[in-house]
């Protein structure tokens, strides 16, 4: 009798865990508004929630689609848990995939919290790659001040390296207005003989 009761408790739990953590077919286009964001399809692509204006009614409509962003190999058929959404400071109705949230110090503190960073590998993998795309190493950012380091935020904001233009250095000299015949012609810094 006790084994039947235990089995009846464990079977639904196992089915739920299988559906949430993988093992079932997840197609982004079939997910609803409340499960799309932070999900990974069975093919390993991240799902994104999109908002559209609907026809004549101008009502907002949401749809879920597969993005071109691939999750790490061990994440497929993954629908993020409510616990991770809460622990990481996420919103189930987040549209698209963006690194903008990495600029928010409150979000970074939650992402770097032990509950999220150690307990929600799918979310951490997503933001690890977004941060890397901005030139920031997420473990270092989380290691310093729990993810609230202003330096990493500044690196993300600048989001790019400014390089000097290729080629030789050229300097220009401003001459007073004069007729074209009186202008000297220069070749490698030396005046050319008159024509």
Image: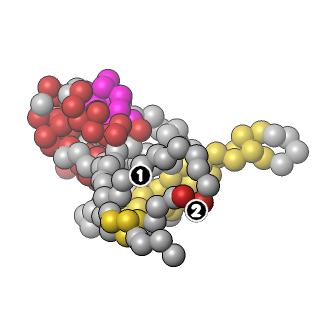
SS assignment at label 1: loop
Mark 2 vs mark 1: in front: 2
Residue 148 in magenta stretch: no
| Residue with the most extreme bottom position | 195
Residue 105 in the image, given as x and y percentages of width and height: 30, 25
Does residue 109 appear left or right of residue 47 in this picture?
left
Q: Residue at x 72, y 40 (%)?
A: 60
Q: State the extent of the magenta-drawn residues as a range.
A: 101-112
Disc number at residue 172? 1
SS assignment at label 2: helix
Q: Residue at x 35, y 37 (%)?
A: 157
> Is 101 placed above or below 79 here?
above
Residue 195 in the image, given as x and y percentages of width and height: 51, 75
Q: Residue at x 14, y 26 (%)?
A: 145
Disc number at residue 181? 2
What whole-number distance in Å separates the C-alpha atoms at marks 2 and 1? 19 Å
Does residue 190 appear left or right of residue 151 in this picture?
right
């Amino acid at each position: 009798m006790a084994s039947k009761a235990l089995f009846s408790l464990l079977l639904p739990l196992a089915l739920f865990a299988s559906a949430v953590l993988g093992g079932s077919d997840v197609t982004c286009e079939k997910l609803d508004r409340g499960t799309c964001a932070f999900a990974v399809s069975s093919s390993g692509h991240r799902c994104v929630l999109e908002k559209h204006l609907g026809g004549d009614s101008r009502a907002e409509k949401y749809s879920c689609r597969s993005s071109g962003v691939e999750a790490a190999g061990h994440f497929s058929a993954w629908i993020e848990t409510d616990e991770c959404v809460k622990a990481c400071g996420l919103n189930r109705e987040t549209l698209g995939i963006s690194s903008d949230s990495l600029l928010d110090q409150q979000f970074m503190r939650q992402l770097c919290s032990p509950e999220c960073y150690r307990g929600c590998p799918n979310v951490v993998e997503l933001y690890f790659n977004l941060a890397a795309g901005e030139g920031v190493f997420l473990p270092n950012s989380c290691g310093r001040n729990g993810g609230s380091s202003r330096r990493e935020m500044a690196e993300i904001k600048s989001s790019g390296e400014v390089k000097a233009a290729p080629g030789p250095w050229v300097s220009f000299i401003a001459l007073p207005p004069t007729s074209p015949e009186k202008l000297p012609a220069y070749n490698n810094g030396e005046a050319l003989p008159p024509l």
